[in-house]
Image (cartoon, helix red, strand yellow):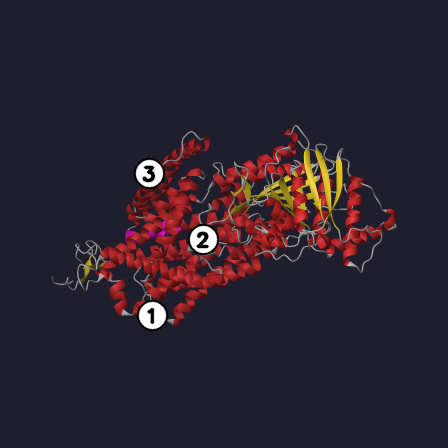
């Protein structure tokens, strides 16, 4: 059988009818679509077939992008930077200089399907951006948002208007001057909202005034940018025909009005049905909406304002809610991970750094871009001064508004395809976007990110010399299953007007690639979107649960908030909240919950465990990890809540006693303190010796036990002392205590100098080492515990600041330690 031969295909320059523009056309065989297989012909070349070549291009583009992203990961640059660089590497400025590689992998005949698929990905990406923007949030932000947006938009826009004509003349490109000037003005003044939203979240600015203001202003700026882009495209496509440009603009306005007059009410009605549970969002509805994206893009392209504008407007018309959240979740991963890198690969193939042969022109354009960035910062400083804000806030706002992203590069690509820009201007502007992003990113991390040193405050523990002072608690919530146990434990602290409690309930939400961006803005505003998405609905449920409990409890103040961040930095949100609130106690839910069969199973994200570990390592105050096995509401119990405190000694166990002391004021709680003593050293300590560490620990333990006995008002207070010799006896005694029907067991993470000998060897087979030996034992499925457990860790566990404070407090009483005696038996 003869080998398949492919004739040389001619490339023709064909003028378009009724137009002065020329287009390059490549002829190819329509039968060469899919290869018959490498085994059919001995020397078959798969890349000669269109579809097989497309798959190879896709693999090359994505692999190169991921590799560059991996290399640049330490710099923490946005992902689109690696995508642009990979496109440049594959283009004429990199390996594209090798004609053999270009002829095989990126021949001219492959450009049509390549760019078609790439633009399809861009259309759906822009559609998801429209889904994430909530226009009513602008009205809630007030006029201050509008003026801040104008301050960072007008000056760069004016700079481009003044210098645009000169720049167009210097480039010497045959493009429409008016369209070029408007387009450059849009590029200079725009802000990438999606990149900005993620940046604000990573810098922990979501709940700050500057974060709220920046996100709201970015929506206004992006609105101006899309209007300017549609105007530039309409003028360029009209070919100098003013009537055609006017008709295109009017058609765009009509299309926008139709979307918000007909599409939006239909989507709101469907969203209400889904929220109320009357009608689920099925496959038919989702498919119809996604097909609507293609129809909108077709209309936008037909009327001369570009397909991207049509898809974006259609996305804006869909309200925030379960529909938008579901669509983003289904579309975002495929578009962002597969199709968008292909878009940048296609862009890189038309970028040629060799075209930048005029150094003066390149420096002039670079100076204009940098001046526009500085004008944004200056505008932020001036408007901040007008509103009596600090200069640092103005600089932060200006830097944040210089965020660049995919949309800016997409607009540059539109300008190139619509003949608004030439290849030279396109290449310079793309490079400046990459350089500006690389410069702005470290500045944001060093200037904008609030610097916080080690925060010192007095009450960092539950144990405090003034029992009437306010106890401040941070309650962390990952999902709704955490709420009942946390509220029950707060109720156990017996909040009253005499012993007030202040609670900051923080709902922790993971920031992922498809977390709705507008959730960040809705979280930052005083009210959420009218049609809240799943995350917002869950936040409202958590808020109502805590506030409803607070309304029926005296002496309790509750504040709720939402923190959105990746699990890698989620512990920073908890620690920052503890420092800001000067908290004495942080309640962390365990990453496992009770199942139907009574065993613990992982119901939260596995990374929650890592978050708990980091909080235990870095927390400035006492931390309590809550292992819930159904503690339930105390007010609904027919019998008293039985609480056992396992006391070995040390700072962590003393904090456990302090928490039990707060619980002892509750009339429905029965406390049982079980003290473990070693046979080798159970003599009573009646004097304080600061040179003997073991004696000092024992002495402080004695004082804490005495204070608990004197302050307790509980009707039933049981105190026991047990002498044990080794770990086996300790485990057996704990098993007997747990079998007595305890509802809650409180243990310290570490057991101090005396207790360490009684738990020796337990850590060698621990399943959850972050809970300490006893916490791991009680949380393990092998032990078979049925009671809920609180594992307590004091700040600076093992001595240091906390112990010194207790010793100073004892010394200030001017009493003989021998006189501070008690009898609990």
* Mark seen at residue 288: 3
Q: Nearer the viewer, residue 696 or 177?
A: 696
The part of the chain drawn in magenta is 228-240
One can see residue 22 in this view:
yes
Residue 230 on the magenta span: yes
Of callouts 3 and 2, the N-terminal one: 2
Secondary element at tag 1 = helix
- Please, which residue is most extreme toward the top here? 638
Judging by the rendered image, the residue that carries numbered circle 2 is: 192
For disc 3, the neighbor class at 10 Å (few under 14, some 14 to 19, many from 20) is few
Does the residue at mark 3 contact the one at mark 1 (Cβ under 8 Å)? no
Secondary element at tag 2 = loop
Left or right, residue 519 beside residue 62: right
Does the residue at mark 3 contact the one at mark 2 (Cβ under 8 Å)? no
For disc 1, the neighbor class at 10 Å (few under 14, some 14 to 19, many from 20) is few
* Mark seen at residue 354: 1
For the residues labelled 2 and 1, the Cα–Cα distance comes to 28 Å
Left or right, residue 438 beside residue 682: left
Frontmost of labels 3 and 2 is 3
Of callouts 2 and 1, the N-terminal one: 2
Q: Nearer the viewer, residue 326 or 55?
A: 55
Q: Position of residue 205 (x, y in %)?
A: 56, 51
Left or right, residue 204 beside residue 735: left
Q: Position of residue 27 (x, y in %)?
A: 18, 59
Most common secondary structure along the magenta stretch: helix
For the residues labelled 3 and 1, the Cα–Cα distance comes to 46 Å
Eyeballing the image, is 146 above or below 157?
Answer: above
Report the residue at 77% width, 38% height from top: 712
Q: Position of residue 414 (x, y in %)?
A: 34, 55
């Amino acid at each position: 059988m003869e080998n398949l031969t492919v004739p040389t295909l001619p490339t023709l320059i064909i003028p378009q009818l009724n137009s002065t523009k020329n287009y390059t056309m490549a002829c190819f065989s329509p039968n060469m679509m899919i290869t018959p297989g490498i085994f059919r012909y001995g020397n078959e070349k798969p890349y000669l077939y269109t579809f097989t070549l497309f798959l190879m291009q896709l693999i090359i583009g994505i692999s190169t992008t991921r590799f560059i992203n991996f290399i640049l990961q330490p710099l923490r640059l946005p992902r689109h930077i690696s995508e642009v660089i990979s496109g440049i590497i594959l283009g004429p400025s990199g390996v594209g200089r090798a004609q053999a590689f270009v002829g095989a992998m990126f021949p001219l005949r492959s450009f049509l399907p390549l760019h078609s698929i790439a633009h399809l990905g861009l259309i759906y990406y822009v559609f998801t951006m429209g889904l994430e923007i909530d226009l009513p949030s602008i009205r809630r932000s007030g006029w201050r948002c509008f003026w801040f947006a104008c301050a960072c938009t007008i000056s760069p826009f004016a700079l481009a208007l003044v210098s645009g004509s000169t720049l167009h003349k210097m480039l010497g490109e045959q493009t429409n001057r008016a369209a070029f000037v408007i387009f450059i003005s849009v590029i200079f003044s725009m802000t990438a909202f999606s990149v900005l939203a993620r940046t604000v979240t990573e810098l922990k600015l979501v709940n700050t005034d500057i974060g709220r203001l920046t996100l709201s202003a970015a929506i206004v700026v992006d609105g101006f940018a899309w209007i300017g882009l549609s105007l530039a495209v309409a003028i360029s496509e009209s070919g100098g025909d003013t009537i055609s440009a006017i008709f295109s603009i009017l058609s765009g306005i009509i299309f926008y009005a139709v979307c918000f007059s007909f599409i939006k009410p239909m989507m709101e009605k469907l969203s209400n049905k889904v929220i109320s549970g009357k009608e689920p969002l099925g496959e038919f509805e989702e498919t119809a909406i996604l097909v609507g994206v293609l129809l909108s893009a077709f209309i936008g392209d037909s009327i001369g304002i570009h397909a991207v504008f049509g898809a974006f407007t259609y996305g804006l018309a869909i309200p925030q809610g379960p529909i938008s959240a579901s669509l983003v979740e289904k579309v975002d991963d495929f578009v962002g991970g597969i199709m968008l890198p292909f878009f940048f690969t296609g862009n890189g193939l038309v970028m040629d750094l060799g075209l930048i042969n005029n150094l003066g022109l390149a420096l002039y354009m670079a100076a204009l871009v940098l001046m526009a960035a500085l004008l944004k910062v200056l505008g932020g400083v001036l408007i901040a001064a007008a509103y009596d804000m600090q200069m640092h806030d103005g600089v932060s706002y200006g830097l944040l508004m210089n965020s660049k992203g995919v949309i800016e590069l997409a607009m540059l690509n539109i300008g190139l395809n619509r003949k608004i820009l030439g290849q030279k201007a396109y290449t310079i502007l793309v490079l400046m976007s990459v350089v500006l992003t690389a410069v702005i990113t470290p500045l944001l991390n060093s200037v904008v990110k609030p610097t916080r040193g080690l925060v010192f405050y007095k009450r960092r523990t539950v144990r405090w010399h003034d029992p009437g002072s306010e106890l401040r608690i941070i309650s962390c919530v990952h999902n709704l299953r955490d709420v009942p146990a946390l509220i029950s434990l707060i109720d156990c602290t017996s909040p009253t007007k005499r012993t007030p409690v202040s609670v900051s309930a923080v709902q922790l939400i993971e920031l992922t690639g498809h977390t709705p961006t507008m959730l960040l803005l809705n979280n930052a505003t005083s009210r959420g979107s009218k049609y809240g998405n799943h995350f917002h609905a869950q936040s409202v449920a958590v808020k109502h649960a805590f506030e409803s409990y607070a309304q029926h409890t005296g002496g309790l103040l509750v504040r709720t908030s939402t923190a959105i961040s990746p699990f890698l930095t989620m512990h920073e949100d908890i620690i920052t909240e503890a420092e800001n609130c000067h908290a004495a106690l942080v309640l962390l839910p365990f990453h496992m919950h009770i199942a139907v069969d009574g065993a613990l199973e992982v119901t939260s994200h596995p990374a929650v465990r890592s978050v708990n570990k980091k909080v235990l390592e870095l927390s400035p105050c006492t931390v309590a990890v809550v292992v819930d096995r159904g503690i339930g509401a105390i007010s609904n119990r027919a019998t008293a809540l039985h609480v056992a405190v396992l006391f070995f000694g040390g700072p962590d166990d003393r904090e456990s006693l302090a928490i039990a002391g707060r619980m002892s004021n509750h009339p429905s709680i029965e406390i049982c303190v079980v003290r473990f003593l070693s046979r080798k050293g159970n003599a009573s300590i009646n004097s304080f010796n600061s040179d003997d560490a073991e004696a000092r620990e024992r002495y402080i333990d004695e004082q804490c036990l005495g204070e608990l006995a004197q302050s307790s008002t509980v009707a039933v207070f049981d105190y026991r002392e047990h002498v044990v010799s080794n770990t086996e006896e300790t485990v057996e005694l704990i098993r007997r205590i747990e079998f007595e029907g305890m509802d809650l067991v409180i243990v310290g993470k570490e057991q101090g100098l005396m207790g360490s000998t009684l738990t020796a060897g337990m850590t060698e087979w621990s399943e959850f080492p972050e809970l300490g030996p006893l916490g791991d034992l009680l949380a393990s499925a092998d032990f078979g515990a049925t009671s809920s457990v609180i594992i307590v860790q004091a700040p600076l566990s093992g001595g240091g600041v906390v112990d010194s404070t207790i010793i100073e407090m004892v010394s200030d009483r001017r009493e003989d330690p021998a006189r501070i005696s008690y009898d609990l038996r």
